Amino acid sequence: MLQDKLEQEIRNFIPLMKERQKEVKRLRLKLDGFDWKDIRESEQYYPLRFFVDGLSAYVYVFDNAAVFYAWAAIEHALLIRLGANALRQAVAANHGRYPGEKQLVTVARKNGIISANKERVAHRLRKLRNDYMHYFNIMWDQHNHKIRLDKLMDSQWPKIVKEIKGATPKHNRAAMSALLDFIKKETDSNYTMVKRQIPYIPGEPPGPEAIRFRRLRIKQFTDWVWEARDVQGRLKRYEYGIERKDALDCLRWSGSLLTYLSFLPK
């Protein structure tokens, strides 16, 4: 019985995995020309190994793992391009301590390993990796977002629904109602840190960098949802989910940086 249930779950995921496979097809094609027997004995091994693991994690719907591997590939690529001498100097300048991820990116820029533009890409990837590595950052933001949304629902939701439906063309009203019902259902669900029994101290959020970046990502996701041409498109993007988009963006950033650092072909 358990085996049958597992096999059914796998079959249910196949359409989604095929959809995700198409999304990373261009990134996978960059790997087609490699001889992995040679890669295992070259400097490319760890950056490409982690990048491939990230792509596989994404296809198999392990988004958090995809984010982690996307950064791991770049961290190792930067270390390789810096080399032992530059890394030794960075450690000495850091009072004998190994530089953290943020400093590693900065050191790579100062040593001419990456451009100013690629430095910004690397920092975006690093910050998002930190959010998923330390998932408390996301949970804290979800909790505070839930508080703000609850207040909005209690005070203005009926008015908002009336105004939106009134401004929606008749042929789109059914889809719009479905979207509004979905939002209301998600809001009513108590997905908060308190309900999930994760201890935290109100008013003691993660560092300011994490807060700013997390809020920027949520704004970018919201903007992406509302850029869709119609209600059906917006609903599909909303259901697509921010974690999936985060994972895919991280892999694309990672692929871009690996190409720039000559670990992947152009």
Image (cartoon, rainbow, N blue to C red):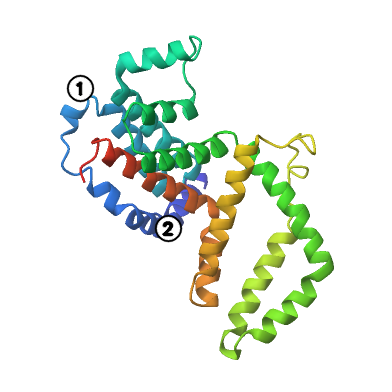
Crowd class of label 1 (few under 14; some 14 to 19; many from 20; radius 10 Å): few
Looking at the image, is mark 2 or mark 1 nearer the viewer? 1
Look at the numbered disc 2 and give the secondary structure of its residue. helix
Q: Is any atom of residue 246 visible in this view?
A: yes
Percent coordinates x, y for residue 88 in the rendering? 37, 12
Which amino acid type is shown beneath numbered disc 2?
Leu
Q: Is residue 109 left or right of residue 33?
A: right
Name the residue located 65 percent from the left edge and 34 percent from the top edge.
207
Name the residue located 69 percent from the left edge and 86 percent from the top edge.
166
Q: Is any atom of residue 60 visible in this view?
A: no
Residue with the most extreme right position: 155
Name the residue located 31 percent from the left edge and 27 percent from the top edge.
46
Which amino acid type is shown beneath numbered disc 1?
Glu
Q: Which residue is mark 2?
A: 16
Could you say which is closer to the camera, residue 185 or residue 8?
A: 185
Q: Which residue is mark 1?
A: 41
Percent coordinates x, y for residue 258 in the rendering? 30, 38
